[in-house]
Amino acid sequence: MKKNLLFSIALLSMLFTSCSSTKTAKTASKTPFVWENANVYFLLIDRFNNGDKTNDQTYNRNKAAAKLRGFEGGDIRGVIQKLDEGYFEKLGITALWMTPVVEQIHDGVNEGTGFTYAFHGYWARDWTTLDPSFGTKKDLAELVQKAHAKGIRVLLDAVINHTGPVTGEDPAYPNDWVRTTPKCTYKSYDTYINCTLVENLPDVKTESNEAVALPPFLIEKWKKEGRYEQEVAELDAFFAKTSYPRAPKYYIMKWLSDYITDYGIDGYRVDTAKHTYEDVWADFKKVCDGAFADFKKNNPKKILDNNAFFTVGEVYGYNIGAKKLFDFGDKKVNYFENGFTGLINFDFRNEAKLNYEPLFSKYNTILQNDLKGNTVMNYVSSHDDSSPYDKKREKTFESGTKLLLTPGISQVYYGDESARTLDIPGTTGDATLRSMMNWNEIKTNPETQKVLLHWQKLGNFRKNHPAIGAGIHQEILASPYVFSRTFSKDNYTDNVVIGLDLPKGQKEILAGSIFKDGTKLKDAYSGKETVVINGKVSIDTDFDIVLLEKL
């Protein structure tokens, strides 16, 4: 017992000290942030960390909900706490993606899986303000500022396709704003778009260019809150500047772009992208780009770099093998030409079953050719995917290795790095994927700490080396498996050599094609140093993985 306690304390010390930040300040200043190499942490605000218990009960949301279908207390203040603790830095995270922050419907609905509240953030009621259960505008401003101070970008979640369900507390948007029938049949391009995803989820008429008036309930609400005149004046200025008609989609684009001009967020993950005509997202990108330019102009000291505003789309079912075209059956659409830098890759959790080289080489070939200039976001688990790669959390080390070393963007779903269980008794549907973050296990369980340390080491190596996600992959040796990644942009170059499934103890690794004889190298996984002799490095470690970088 005493031995386990000492081990736990020692490992905790490794986890929560600065040792996981493997690069020097000099290296940090030279390493560019490249979206194609981003290590994105995706979290449900309500399920991550409760930093402010005073906002746990808002809008009288006190009806009994089905298991994990009510508000659990997580909030933006809780995310800020983990930023302050350095949790994301130690994990090598370079971008935070949070579920929608906008005000949600006040009541809940019975979905057939039990009574459900809008804890997930995808049932918007008022796009112009934050839901108090998530936090305040001041909280969001602090989060973005603190994330940026640590070199971490912030992605919010954009929903334009639909509003929240109609309830006794939540009026419907007018008929010239939304449709409530028919229900989508998903048999053709049109039957994905001009329809409602499910019953009682009003579909915004995003195809319309007809001018509509503000919803009466919003006018009344804003007047009660003392901001009606300001909101109307801003809308007038937006429509005068853009010359867009006052159609529903453009109102929502304006409201979402405010989070760029007001807070300086760096990108949007776009929800339900294939359920509108693709030109909606081309227009949205233009609006976002304009807002981002305005923010930079008005806040020159807050500019992180010259990267463009980033957009990644949820085109459900898209996979990297489709390259640039998504096939509806009767029509193929190129979303990369309609506002998106990247798309979520829904098949990675299946392709992660491949061995390392077939997986890495396939992604390298597509990203360096057909998708050059664009990218995909890979994941092993997510908030609404019922078939994650490792649902029983039996391959947590392998999951981290494959996700974090595969070309493209890595999306770490909260708890992937700590083996948060994805099988919760008493839940139905996707609720089982959305439990509270397992902070207590991170603090007390040595096995959880080992998994986290693995993800931290790999995450920081990726963070320090754009070559991992954005570079060119090349196999050096099939057995034992060794490969290189090389990246070059402007005056910056980055080269690494990686060995996987190696023998523990003494090992020799070919590195001469990447590093010249006499080059001093460091294994970022063990922390040990070595030197290239006759095109090889010799290193003795207790691990079967080696991450070689130039000292």
Image: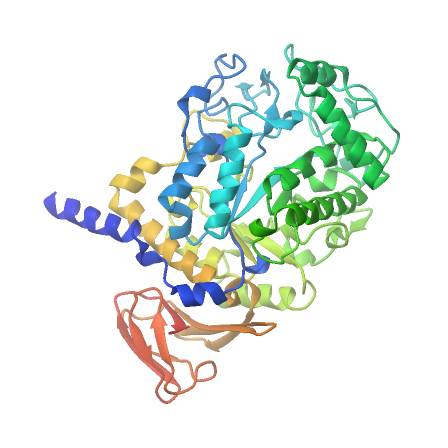
**Residue 248 placement, left or right of 273:** right
Q: Is residue 72 above or below residue 448?
A: above
Q: How is the image coloured?
A: rainbow
Q: Quadrant of residue 288?
A: top right
Residue 156: where, in percent of width, then height?
Answer: 59, 40
x, y percent for residue 298: 65, 46
User: Which image quarter is the C terminus in?
Assistant: bottom left
- Count the numbered circles shown: 0
447 vs 119: above or below: below
Residue 487 lies left or right of residue 47; in this view the side is right
219 shown above or below 194:
above
Camera-side residue of 3 and 135:
135
**Does residue 392 appear in this view?**
no
In the rendering, at what x and y percent does residue 46 appear?
A: 48, 30
Q: Nearer the viewer, residue 347 or 204?
A: 204
Query: For this view, does 161 lie left or right of residue 300?
Result: right
Residue 65 visible in the shown view: yes
From the viewer's perspective, tell me whether residue 403 is left or right of residue 420: right
Can you say whether 440 is above or below 373 in the image? above
Q: Hey, which residue is sitting farthest right in the picture?
A: 210
Where residue 394 sits in the image (x, y, percent)? 37, 48
Nearest to the observer: residue 375 or residue 550:
550
The outermost residue toward the top is: 168
Q: Nearer the viewer, residue 6 or 54?
A: 54
Which residue shows up at 24% across the image and 50% down it? 13
Which of the 4 quarters of the picture holds residue 97? top right
**Quadrant placement of the N terminus:** top left
Residue name at image x 43 percent, y 86 percent:
516
Query: Going by the picture, which residue comes out furthest to the left?
Result: 2
